[in-house]
Image: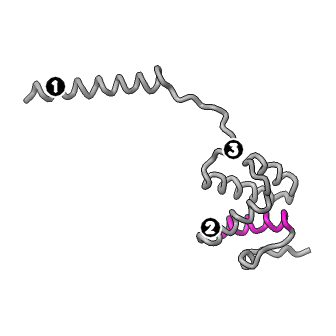
Amino acid sequence: MSRFLVSLFIGLALGVLVGLYLGWVQFPVQYIDSPAGALARSYKDQYTVMIAAGFAQDGDVAGAVERLRVLGVENIPAYVLEVTERYITNSQNVADIRLLVQLYEGLAGRVTPLMEPYRQVRLP
């Protein structure tokens, strides 16, 4: 029994050592400058919310459009509309929805009926 346990322990230790060598030395992960358009949809959505938060602070439409271009989207207002309506439909964070609605209104100059309850009216 003890010979079996010693053999098992040695086998596990050798397996871990070989795995570490192969994973870190022989075949390490190679990071390549991947484009932002290759991100998963959830990460693109989070990036869009961050851009919307920046837009809420500075109101720079051209800057927001330039930052969203990195995602490789051709029609940016339509993309922001899609993300905003998906957030509303899936009952995401209300603060994020308000930021997205504000960004869409800045880009398109209007809001859809679905966005109307989340619209923040600015006083002059």
Q: Secondary structure at mark 1?
A: helix
The residue beneath circle 3 is 36
Place of residue 49 in the rendered image (x, y in percent of width and height, measured from the top left): 70, 58
Place of residue 23 in the rendered image (x, y in percent of width and height, measured from the top left): 44, 27
Tell me where the magenta segment starts and ends, as one range. Answer: 94-108
The residue beneath circle 1 is 6
Near-viewer residue (62 or 113): 113
The residue beneath circle 2 is 93
Q: Is residue 39 left or right of residue 77?
A: left
Q: Residue furthest left?
A: 1
Q: In the image, what residue type sits under mark 1?
A: Val
The answer to whether residue 100 is magenta is yes
Position of the N terminus by quadrant: top left
Residues under numbered marks 2 and 3 in contact, where contact means CB atoms less than 8 Å apart? no
> Looking at the rendering, which quadrant does residue 53 occupy?
bottom right
* Mark found first going from the N terminus, 3 or 1: 1
> Looking at the rendering, which quadrant does residue 121 occupy?
bottom right
